[in-house]
């Protein structure tokens, strides 16, 4: 959505007390959960600056733990997210780091681990009013917000990946709103991030995977 | 013709040209820009109202303390006051409801930010109290939300509603302006009167600082919501009586933003100044004195005792 809706003003519907420290934290963790798209055995959270200083009083920990269980900002189960994580067998740990300076005062690192040992780390920032952005995936700097349907393609930084992905998308009539490329170093690992106003059908992800340079695909639907 | 608008002036123009209310203009804008039906907008507004209804009433039956223990039970104290009502039924109830929403919010309950969580009590407090007193149906309550949404959208677009950017005047001040305008329309006033009420409301709270004790959305946020309601009622009454503010709405939005940007950082949600920076405010902070009170706060933390004493 690229306009301010009446529901951006009269909203979001949210579990209190803070749109930035509670709802925003839920949104970051929910995106981490959607990106990971695997069962979670272990979750580690590191909270920085304002998140670390006032997070306890704002239930930021409960919000984060709720988000990685798939709860949205208006889900009353957030209040009980510790007990529900225990019941689900999720091991969790919080680090309240109020010493390290980060680019944005409301920053959290989330490390998720699946039962078979697969790991994903993301860094998210809560930028106000429940709005957020993800600024790192697995230590590579990226930027996306989750406002749009988002396709993330992890790939080897070699020629041909972008052309392949855009070919598949245009073949299926998906209109690309924004597209950005990130990588750790030349010839290393890259992330292609494609955002679209419409739903990106997941039935052609296999086609994208056919390219041997593609390592992994993540998809977030609005 | 497009129903989008970027200023109060343009919104006013649309209302005049089409002979419609502010709420109707906002409804048409939402349908146009979101490519959605009126029914779908109204279904979402219905959900907003359901949450608002629950959040104004829930703490009256079962007061809950906040995570920190700073607040809890205030709504019931006002609602059930054994003293003669000083403010009359509608305003007293609106104040109680606004306090209630902040109690729900502080206890990790479900609320509708309007426009923020810290100012979420003002609009539902006023609209739902008046609806009970005057017997307004749900569709009319939705009009109140749409009207308030239009004013809030303009404040978000052309200024800010973030306390960290422009202080409490941008949160409770914005909520109060939105509510004043909504109340005017619901009471039968013209779009012009709505803008007058909103301008007066912004003007009255201009400069209000954001100084939450321990950085929490509790004190002074809760009672600020009560003053946001009272200011909205007062400004609606002024506008409905034909009183005008010489400075147009768009200029007041700009003035609010410029005042906000000139507030020192200590008074913009940093929890270092105002209430938060007092020795007592500092003692409530988990991290202890962060320098805001210039080292006046006593060593140690007696917040626990204070909470227990309450």
Image (cartoon, rainbow, N blue to C red):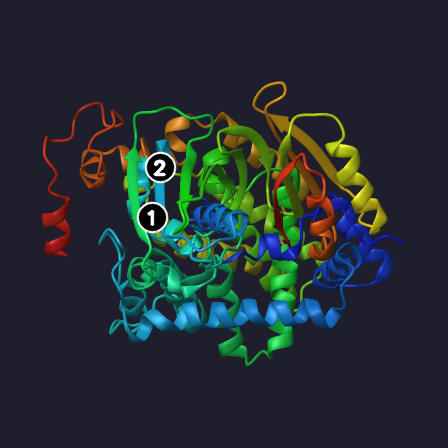
What residue sits 10% from the left and 34% below the top?
Answer: B300
Q: Position of residue A117 (x, y in %)?
A: 40, 45
Q: Position of residue B251 (x, y in %)?
A: 66, 37
Chain bearing mark 2: A
Q: How dense is the environment of label 1, judged by Cα within 10 Å: few (below 14), some, or many (20 and up)? A: many
Q: Which residue is mark 2?
A: A47
B276, B82: nearer the viewer: B276
* Helix, strand or loop under label 1: helix
Residue B210 location, quadrant:
top left
What residue sits 50% from the left and 35% below the top?
Answer: B166
Say whether disc 2 or disc 1 marks the residue closer to the N-terminus.
2
User: Tags 2 and 1 in contact by the CB under 8 Å rule?
Assistant: yes
Residue B187 visible, this orientation: no
What residue sits 55% from the left and 81% below the top?
Answer: B135
Q: CA distance from mark 2 to mark 1?
A: 9 Å
Decide: is B235 above or below B256. Answer: below
Q: Which residue is mark 1?
A: A61
Chain bearing mark 1: A
Decide: is B191 above or below A151. Answer: below
């Amino acid at each position: 959505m690229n306009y301010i809706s009446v529901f951006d003003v009269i909203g979001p519907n949210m579990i209190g007390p803070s749109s930035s420290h509670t709802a925003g934290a839920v949104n970051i963790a929910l995106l981490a959960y959607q990106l990971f798209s695997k069962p979670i055995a272990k979750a580690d959270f590191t909270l920085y600056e304002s998140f670390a200083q006032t997070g306890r009083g704002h239930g930021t920990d409960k919000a984060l733990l709720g988000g990685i269980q798939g709860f949205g900002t208006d889900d009353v189960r957030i209040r009980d997210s510790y007990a529900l994580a225990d019941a689900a067998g999720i091991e969790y740990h919080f680090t309240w780091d109020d010493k390290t300076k980060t680019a944005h005062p409301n920053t959290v690192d989330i490390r998720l681990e699946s039962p078979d040992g697969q790991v994903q780390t993301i860094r998210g920032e809560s930028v106000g009013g429940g709005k957020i952005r993800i600024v790192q995936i697995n230590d590579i700097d990226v930027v996306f917000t989750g406002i749009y349907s988002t396709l993330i393609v992890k790939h080897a930084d070699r020629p041909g990946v972008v052309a392949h992905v855009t070919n598949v998308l245009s073949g299926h009539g998906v209109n690309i709103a924004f597209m950005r490329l990130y990588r750790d170093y030349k010839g290393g690992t890259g992330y292609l991030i494609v955002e679209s106003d419409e739903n990106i059908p997941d039935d052609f992800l296999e086609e994208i995977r056919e390219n041997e340079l593609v390592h992994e695909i993540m998809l977030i639907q609005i | 013709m497009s129903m989008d608008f970027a200023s109060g002036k343009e919104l006013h123009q649309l209302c005049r040209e089409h002979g419609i209310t502010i709420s109707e203009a906002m409804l048409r804008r939402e349908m146009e820009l979101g490519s959605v039906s009126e029914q779908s907008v109204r279904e979402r507004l219905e959900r907003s109202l359901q949450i608002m209804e629950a959040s104004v009433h829930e703490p009256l039956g079962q007061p809950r303390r906040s995570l920190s223990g700073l607040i809890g039970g205030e709504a019931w104290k006002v609602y059930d006051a054994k003293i003669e009502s000083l403010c009359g039924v509608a305003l007293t109830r609106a104040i109680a409801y606004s306090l209630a929403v902040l109690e729900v919010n502080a206890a990790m309950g479900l609320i509708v930010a309007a426009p923020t969580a810290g100012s979420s009590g003002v609009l539902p407090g006023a609209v739902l109290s008046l609806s009970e007193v005057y017997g307004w149906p749900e569709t009319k309550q939705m009009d109140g939300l749409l009207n308030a949404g239009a004013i809030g959208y303009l404040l978000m677009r052309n200024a800010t509603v973030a306390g960290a950017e422009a202080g409490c005047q941008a949160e409770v001040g914005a909520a109060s302006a939105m509510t004043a305008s909504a109340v005017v329309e619901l009471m039968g006033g013209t779009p012009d009167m709505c803008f007058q009420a909103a301008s007066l409301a912004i003007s009255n709270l201009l400069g209000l600082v954001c100084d939450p004790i321990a950085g929490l959305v509790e004190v002074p946020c809760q009672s600020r919501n009560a003053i946001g309601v009272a200011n909205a009622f007062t400004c609606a009454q002024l506008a409905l009586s034909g009183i005008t503010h010489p400075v147009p709405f768009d200029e007041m939005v700009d003035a609010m933003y410029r005042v906000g940007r000139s507030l020192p950082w200590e008074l913009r949600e940093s929890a270092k100044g105002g209430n938060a920076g007092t020795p007592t405010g500092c003692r409530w902070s988990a991290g202890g004195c962060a320098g805001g009170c210039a080292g006046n706060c006593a060593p140690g933390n007696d917040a626990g005792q204070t909470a227990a004493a309450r």
